[in-house]
Amino acid sequence: MLSISPIPAFSDNYIWHLQQGDEHWVVDPGEADPVIKALQGASLNGILITHHHPDHTGGIAPLVKKYQCPVLGPASIAGVTTPLTGGGVVTVLGMPLGVCDIPGHTLDHLALILREPVSGSSVQTHLFCGDTLFAAGCGRLFEGTPEQMFHSLAKLSALDATTRVYCAHEYTLDNLHFANTVEPGNTAIAQRLASCQALRDANEPTLPSTIALELATNPFLRCKVPEVMKSAARHAGHPNPSTLDQVALFALLREWKDHF
């Protein structure tokens, strides 16, 4: 039985801990000590990395030193022993892990898509998306362009609606407040905001999300929605949102969120 749980790190990072039987993997270990503590004496079988930022990679060297485990991720990252590229598939925990290029936040960013066999012929998809797709939001554009990020998000939003989304930061409440400002008529956002506030009040994570929930409440995946279009254009002082394509609207939203 696959177990996926968050290991809190720094102030708002999550290192995702994947366990099946005696096998343990972690995703984006920005620091090593929380991982070692969570393992409770067990061995670490491998590390998965989505992109090169230090809060996702800082724990690689000490973990490899302690556990001599492989590191799978972008070839650009020091310490990676098995470079991953978009379109590739590797086996992790006995399951296929697909790799998708999703530039925008960084140019080397990868999405890692684990497909878990469940009852019968059914599959549960688990998406580890680093800092590209957040719950009700998306990552800042540190290296890529709005067009790159828009198309990366489109790839992720095309996954099965039941796909579980494991992003790397607890940014949900802030993102939902922004989403509610952009689209105040969306009752799904208000409901999600209330439920996530209750989780945080109880010191519980708001993740994982699902693709279905993101499509219903994430403004960056809703650039076709008239209220989102009008809000983004109005905030930017643009007189006619109908003349803007979706990439342009996405860029306006991202710029707005950067200063929200």
Image: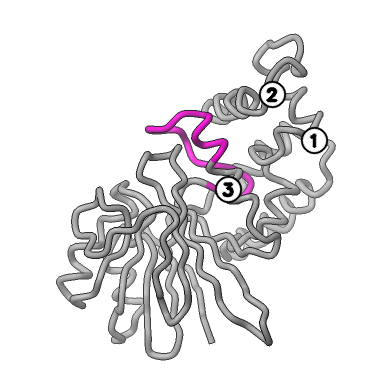
Q: Which amino acid lies under the numbered mark 2 shown in the image of this protein? A: Ala
> Which element is circle 2 on?
helix
Give how far across and how far down residue 177 sits, in percent. Answer: 67, 40
Question: Local crowd at mark 3 within 10 Å, few (<14), some, or many (≥20)?
Answer: some
Label 2 sits on residue: 232
Asked if the stretch drawn in magenta spans residue 140, the answer is yes
Q: Nearer the viewer, residue 161 or 65?
A: 161
* For the residues bearing labels 1 and 3, Cβ distance under 8 angstroms: no
Label 1 sits on residue: 184
Q: How is the image coloured?
A: one colour
Q: Residue at 79% of width from left, 52% of height from top?
A: 191
* Residue extending furthest toward the front: 87
Q: Residue 22 is drawn in which quadrant? A: bottom left
Q: How many marks?
A: 3
Question: Local crowd at mark 2 within 10 Å, few (<14), some, or many (≥20)?
Answer: many
| Viewer-nearest of discs 3 and 2 | 3
Magenta residues, start to end: 133-151
Give how far across and how far down residue 146 sits, in percent. Answer: 52, 29
Label 3 sits on residue: 155
